């Protein structure tokens, strides 16, 4: 579910009007709605006994295996040179192996909409890291976008009555730790992505090696989620998450290639709205006005950060 893994690409040439005005928006809505469902399924699986690391294995090795099948059918394989394997591994660690268990551990304790807010925080934190490294010039509007994101966090954790229970603030902060790793992944890809890296194959390599790295962790804590039959609620939810992650990655790749990474990055806002819907449908969740304010603040923040043109430092 780490979208930033596919963003550092050169935008495609201006697409035909059909792609830009019809297919692109439809794909954006589909991705947001279905990826938002994935967060609800993670909450459902966690509430029914699935270990967070077990869910990570399903979402990495499971989804990666499906994408590897696509690679084989297309005759495009992940590179096996050490430099590429190292890139895939670090990418997988930052995007799945470390933040995945955090997010899935948090999932049973927070409303789905609040859980999905960890996704738009990633591009905002990425810009903070970019400024710290001085790879881009300071932009007042993008800085304002970051500020709006933190205002959104404040609207969740500070007002009394924002969350269903006061003790949930710690879970929100733990979820934000996952966002920090997603931001590190975004920055790592931007700085270290091989110039000839293919998006599909590098995503496949990232999922597979990130998942393999999680196997010792799963063994150490007995966190495996076995595909038993008849399937339990947790296995059904994990199976659906696996299919969703693989399918949405493919659609995301198409959107990035056909329309561009900036347009595709707006999926984050649709995921949050979908999280509101699925949380209401599946868990009967009703959000406080403070959380709605946080959603609006973060949506504005993501728009300000991602829609502004970047200016390299020194220019």
Image (cartoon, helix red, strand yellow):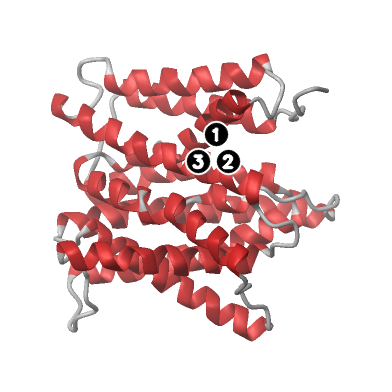
Can residue 223 be seen here? Answer: no
Q: Nearer the viewer, mark 1 or mark 3?
A: 3
Residue depicted at 61% across the width and 24% down the height: 131
Q: Is residue 130 visible?
A: yes
Residue 46 image point, x, y percent: 20, 55
- Determine contact: label 1, label 2, CB under 8 Å: yes
Query: Do labels 3 and 2 touch, CB within 8 Å?
Result: yes
Instruction: Name the element at disc 2.
Output: helix
Secondary structure under the numbered disc 1 in the rendered image: helix
In contact (CB < 8 Å): disc 1 and disc 3: no
Q: Secondary structure under badge 3?
A: helix
Q: Earlier in the sequence, mark 1 or mark 3?
A: 1
Q: Is residue 237 left or right of residue 312?
A: left
Dividing the picture into quarters, in which one does residue 314 lie? top right
The residue identified by callout 1 is 126
Look at 56% across and 63% down and name the residue there.
203
Report the front residue among 98 and 119: 98
Residue 186 image position (x, y, % from top left): 56, 44
Which quadrant would residue 212 be assigned to in this image?
Answer: bottom left
- Where residue 43 appears, as percent x and y from the top left, is 25, 52
| Mark 2 burial class by Cα count in 10 Å: few <14, some 14-19, many 20+ | many
Dot 1 crowding, Cα within 10 Å, few <14, some 14–19, many 20+? many
In the displayed structure image, the side of residue 33 where residue 241 appears, left or right:
left
Q: Which residue in the protein does label 3 denote?
A: 184
Write down the residue under mark 2.
187
Which residue shows up at 68% across the image and 41% down it? 262
In the rendered image, the quadrant that contains the N terminus is bottom left
Q: Is residue 234 above or below residue 35?
A: below
Q: Is residue 211 above or below residue 293?
A: below
Image: 125 above or below 96 = above
């Amino acid at each position: 579910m780490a979208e930033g893994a596919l963003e550092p690409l050169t935008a495609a040439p201006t697409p035909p009007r059909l792609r830009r005005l019809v297919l692109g928006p439809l794909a954006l809505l589909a991705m947001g709605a279905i990826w938002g469902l994935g967060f609800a399924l993670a909450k459902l699986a966690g509430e029914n006994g699935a270990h967070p690391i077990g869910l990570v294995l399903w979402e990495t090795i499971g989804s990666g295996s499906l994408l590897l099948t696509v690679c084989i059918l297309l005759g495009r394989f992940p590179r096996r040179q050490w430099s590429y394997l190292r890139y895939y591994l670090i990418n997988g660690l930052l995007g799945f192996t470390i933040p995945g268990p955090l997010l899935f551990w948090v999932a049973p304790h927070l409303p789905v909409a609040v859980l999905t807010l960890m996704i738009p925080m990633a591009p905002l934190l990425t810009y903070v890291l970019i400024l710290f490294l001085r790879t881009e010039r300071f932009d007042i509007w993008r800085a304002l976008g970051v500020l709006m994101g933190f205002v959104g966090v404040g609207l969740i954790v500070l007002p009394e009555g924002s969350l269903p229970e006061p003790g949930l603030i710690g879970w929100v902060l733990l979820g934000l730790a996952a966002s920090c790793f997603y931001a590190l992944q975004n920055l790592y890809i931007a700085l270290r992505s091989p110039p000839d890296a293919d998006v599909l194959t590098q995503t496949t390599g990232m999922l597979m090696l990130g998942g393999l790295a999680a196997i010792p962790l799963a063994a150490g804590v007995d966190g495996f989620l076995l595909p038993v039959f008849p399937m339990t609620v947790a296995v059904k939810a994990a199976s659906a998450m696996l299919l969703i992650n693989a399918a949405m990655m493919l659609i995301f790749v198409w959107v990035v290639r056909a329309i561009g990474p900036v347009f595709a990055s707006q999926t984050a806002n649709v995921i949050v709205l979908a999280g509101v819907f699925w949380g209401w449908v599946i868990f009967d969740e009703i959000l406080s006005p403070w959380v709605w304010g946080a959603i609006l603040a973060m949506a504005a923040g993501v728009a300000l950060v991602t829609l502004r043109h970047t200016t390299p430092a020194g220019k």
